[in-house]
Image (spheres, rainbow, N blue to C red):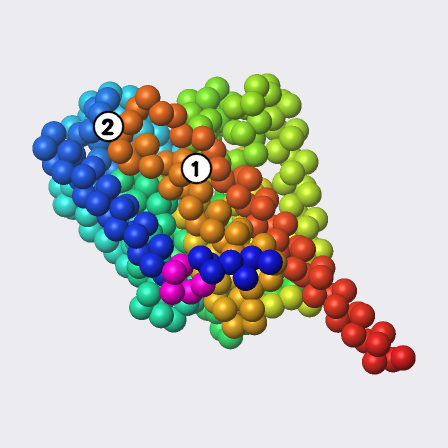
Amino acid sequence: MLKDMPWLTAPRARLYVSGVAIVLVLTLARSLLLFYRDGGYGANNFLLGSDFLTFWAASLQVLAGHPAEVYLPELHLLAEAPYLREGYEAFFYPPTMLLLCVPLALAPYFASLFVFISVTAASFAAVIWRILRTPWCLVAILAYAPVYLNAVAGQNAFLTASILGCGLNIMDRRPKLAGAILGLMVIKPHLALAVPIALIVTGRWRTLIWAGMSSISLVVLSALLFGLDTWLNFLDVSHSARQALENGDVEFSLLQSVYATARLLGAGVNTAFIIHGLVALGMTCVLVWMLRQKISAATERSIIVLACLLITPFCLFYDMLIMALPLAWMLREWLRVGFPAWSKMVLGVTFLAPMVFYLPVLYQLSVVKPLPFGSPVIILFCWLLVRESTQTRQAAHGGREVAAV
């Protein structure tokens, strides 16, 4: 049905995506102009790349020889003080993340922010280009709203998307290297909870072993460089991350998990966790079932990434940049074999949802609150992949029956 709609043909789709890219580029340019005019600060004293400040401040403390103090909020706040006008940007990352943060404070804050975002964005673009293998993918990247949201927030989603995309992309061809790359997700492990499950279910033992070795090596290296006190302080402060999640210190409208959606709809803490747990369990079952079927490599990688995003209760708006991976994998797959029913609609909704909900944020319209779009979009995408896999299997089974007759 959808393939008969003329506005979804490739030339018109590219023209539409190009228009969206132009709108978002101009929007970013306007935002950067406002930030530049006000010395790097926006509305409500919002610092450009404010989340990056916690990485930069952590680097400042490490270079000063006090890595364990990163996990003492009152001292970490002092390191942020030169740029932070109000509030506090907490550092809830494990000490393995400090390995990445070490050189950041060697340059002034804004210069370091520019280099960090540029380098990680280039790695993300390279991964997407590797999947789609067309220069036009750069236009598509410019039309994807989470790219700008991550850049303005100064977050590391470019990096995590690159790690997941690169590792999953090569796990069939170079299993050991894929494992070593996937092990780097130890810097943000809650976004990779589905990866070891997937590797076990599919019997990719070499990838699993190398991922474990990579992760353990980073943990040991961080302990040797920063001391056991740093890890002990991290474990001591980790409960603050759960409290922040439960108390709404991070606005539920910025979180994209089922838990946050339930809280926004009025559910209490325990009820929201139960709902999220049931959905996460269901997603795990779907993941295991799908991986035991005969599915394409693109579908396999996509369902792993979707499970990673849906299982964790702490998934923020910039983390949805990772959705670019299943979008790219399935677009390339369906361009090759043909688009199944509803696939173009689901791709379009997934691609545009961040822009619809977060365009007010880019325009700094504080009167409009963003709404979580993540979990509905992930569930919709999962439904499409499960539906297509089921129909393909039924068609193959029917074909065998006909051949037998």
Tell me if residue 212 can be seen.
no
Q: Nearer the viewer, residue 335 or 222?
A: 335
Q: CA distance from mark 2 to mark 1?
A: 18 Å
The residue pinned by badge 1 equals 316
Locate the N terminus and report the quarter of the image it occupies.
bottom right
The percent position of residue 353, horizontal first and vertical second, equals: 44, 42
Viewer-closest of 20 and 154: 20
Answer with the quarter of the image where residue 135 lies: bottom left
Asked whether, in this view, residue 224 is left or right of residue 179, the answer is left
The residue drawn where x is 60% and y is 26% is 272
Q: Which residues are magenta?
A: 9-13
Prevailing secondary structure of the magenta residues? helix
Image quarter in which the C terminus is found: bottom right
Q: Position of residue 141 (x, y in %)?
A: 34, 56
Residue at 53% across / 66% down in the picture? Answer: 334
Which of the labelled discs sits on residue 70, or is there none? Answer: none
